[in-house]
Amino acid sequence: MRTPTKVTFLGTAGGRVTTFRLVRRSGGFLVELGDKKVHVDPGPGAFVYLKEKGIDYRDIDLIVLSHIHLDHTADVNTLIEACTDGGKRRGLSLVAPRSAIEGRDRIVLPYLTSRLDRVEILEEGRSIYTDGIRIRAIMRHTHHGAETYGLEIGEGIVYLSCARYDKRMLETYPKNPRLMIINTTFYKRRPGIDHLSVEEVKELIAECRPDLTVITHFSMEMHQRDPNLVAKELNEELGLSVVAAYDGMEIELK
Ligand SMILES: [Zn+2]
Ligand SMILES: [Zn+2]
């Protein structure tokens, strides 16, 4: 039997303008797998938007980071403090690239790591089991010099984070997943910018054929074009279920 799964999109902004002029919210998404809660990429505002959704921070079991950029991590330290009740509550783990924890660009404050039960490092192809949840680093992406991973969360919940398009994705990403969340930042291909465009997403989902695709992480170009129309276009062209995320959207998978 499949674990009942719910995904809440706290924010849907991607790129400098939509994120940092607050055209759309950020904050990543919360995945609920049965009674387990996983927060993925807690960008700016995650702390506030979780509260708005009625989530008790102390119920969160795991935080996962795809890469260090601020639109994916700005609230990670605040959440470590909130989820552990200032260090009083045990039971929070973190899964992240090594660059988020160590080295010059680390974004997790060293004094907070003692509040975490476990810290696990992502490596391409590696599966991590923590709190009864499996997190798999499907593939390391090329993304503006940041160590970035595409992830599988639980069984068949696939997150394709920010990335330059790479044909290797076609064979590396799993086929027929239950859900594929894709950071679809641009409509048109942008050579030299390490983000996915709709054209590339089209190739990918035509190959992977997810039960449901959610596009998110929109630049101004996508925002102005209306992501709902783009989702409809993909839907009609490929005969696949595609929806555009909006701030606060909740989806349930049976
Ligand atoms: Zn991003
Ligand atoms: Zn990024």
Image (cartoon, helix red, strand yellow):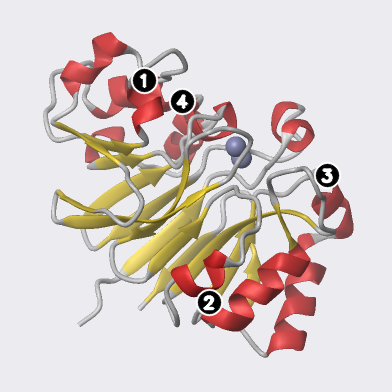
Q: Is residue 228 above or below residue 54?
A: below
Q: In which quarter of the image is residue 253?
A: bottom left
Amino acid marked by disc 1: Val
| Front-most of residues 235 and 58 | 235
Q: Report which residue position mark 3 lands on.
A: 220
Q: Earlier in the sequence, mark 4 or mark 1?
A: 4
The N terminus - image quarter: bottom left
Amino acid marked by disc 3: Met
State if disc 2 and disc 1 touch (CB < 8 Å): no
Q: Is residue 84 above or below residue 150?
A: above
CA gap between label 3 and label 4 equals: 23 Å
Q: Report which residue position mark 4 lands on.
A: 75
Q: Give the SS element for disc 3.
A: helix
| Front-most of residues 129 and 57 | 129
Left of 189 or right of it: where is 83? left
Q: Where's residue 108, x and y in %?
A: 36, 20
Q: Where's residue 215, x and y in %?
A: 64, 62
Q: Give the SS element for disc 4.
A: loop
Amino acid marked by disc 2: Leu
Is residue 241 shown to the viewer in this render?
no
Q: Where's residue 36, x and y in %?
A: 22, 53
Q: Report which residue position mark 2 lands on.
A: 212
**Quarter of the rendered structure image containing ligand 1:** top right
Q: Report which residue position mark 1 lands on.
A: 108
Amino acid marked by disc 4: Asp
CA gap between label 4 and label 2 equals: 28 Å
- Res 211 label: none
Residue shown at 88% from the left, 52% from the top: 224
Q: Which of marks 4 and 2 is nearer the N terminus?
A: 4
